Image: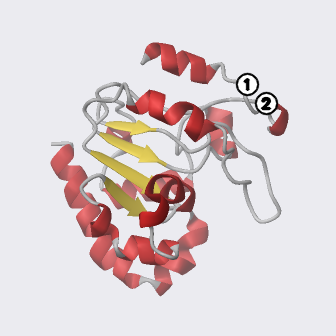
Amino acid sequence: MEEVLNKIKHCTECANNLTLGPNPVLSVHPDSRIIIIGQAPGLAVHNTNIPWNDKSGNNLRKWMGISAQQFYDTHQVGIIPMGFCYPGKGKTGDLPPRKECAPLWHQLLFDQLKQVELVLLVGKYAQDYYLKESKCKNLTETVQNFRAYLPEYFVLPHPSPRNNIWQAKNEWFKEDVLPELKFLVNQLLK
């Protein structure tokens, strides 16, 4: 695992496409039991090198029902984004994760992870990549049918505060999905 992480930390595969240059941010250990696959680091994460170190991370930890200490204990929770570096700013927010990272590194990482019991697919990019044809026609339907992907995957929308409107329109998420997520996370991290 150390060798793979070292290669990722020194990766320059898409350096020419990154406005702030490469700065891969991930957090994983061979003993990680829950893996979170999100999008890509935002600017705050790029600047601090701490994954999910922003309002989205606060929301995700709240959804999971765990403390920051548990969240950042790599023996418990591993964090592997779809794109390891901050992709830059777009017209309406951050650019999508770079497409090079997941095919280049994810399988090499998962080959080292023997204790994984649950993978959280957070957002459309992770769901598109891992679920392929088994995903529903849109993110809302995929998340509504979250049980269809268990026990391997737990699908979630992105926890960005920008998605508060989506959450308000889809109250079933808070009532049905989040209690089950908290229960599973609690069982795995006992």
* Foreground pick, 181 / 62: 181
Q: Is residue 178 visible?
A: no
Image quadrant of residue 175? bottom left
Q: Is residue 189 visible?
A: yes
Q: Amino acid at mark 1?
A: Thr
Q: Residue at x 79, y 38 (%)?
A: 18
Taking the image as shown, residue 151 lies to the left or right of residue 103, namely left
Taking the image as shown, residue 157 lies to the left or right of residue 151, namely right
Q: Position of residue 50 (x, y in %)?
A: 54, 35
Image quadrant of residue 72? top left
Q: Position of residue 131 (x, y in %)?
A: 44, 58
| Screen quadrant of the N terminus | top left
* Foreground pick, 163 / 139: 139
Looking at the picture, does residue 87 appear above or below residue 9?
Answer: below
Q: How is the image coloured?
A: secondary structure
Taking the image as shown, residue 47 lies to the left or right of residue 107, namely right
Q: Residue at x 58, y 50 (%)?
A: 39
Q: Residue at x 33, y 46 (%)?
A: 67
| Screen quadrant of the C terminus | top left
Q: Position of residue 8 (x, y in %)?
A: 59, 24
The residue wearing badge 2 is: 15
Mark 1 crowdedness (10 Å alpha carbons): few <14, some 14-19, many ≥20: some
The residue positioned farthest toward the top in the image shown: 3
The residue wearing badge 1 is: 12
The residue positioned farthest toward the front in the image shown: 133
Image quadrant of residue 113? top left
- The secondary element bearing badge 1 is classed as loop
Looking at the picture, does residue 18 appear above or below residue 40?
Answer: above
Q: Amino acid at mark 2?
A: Ala
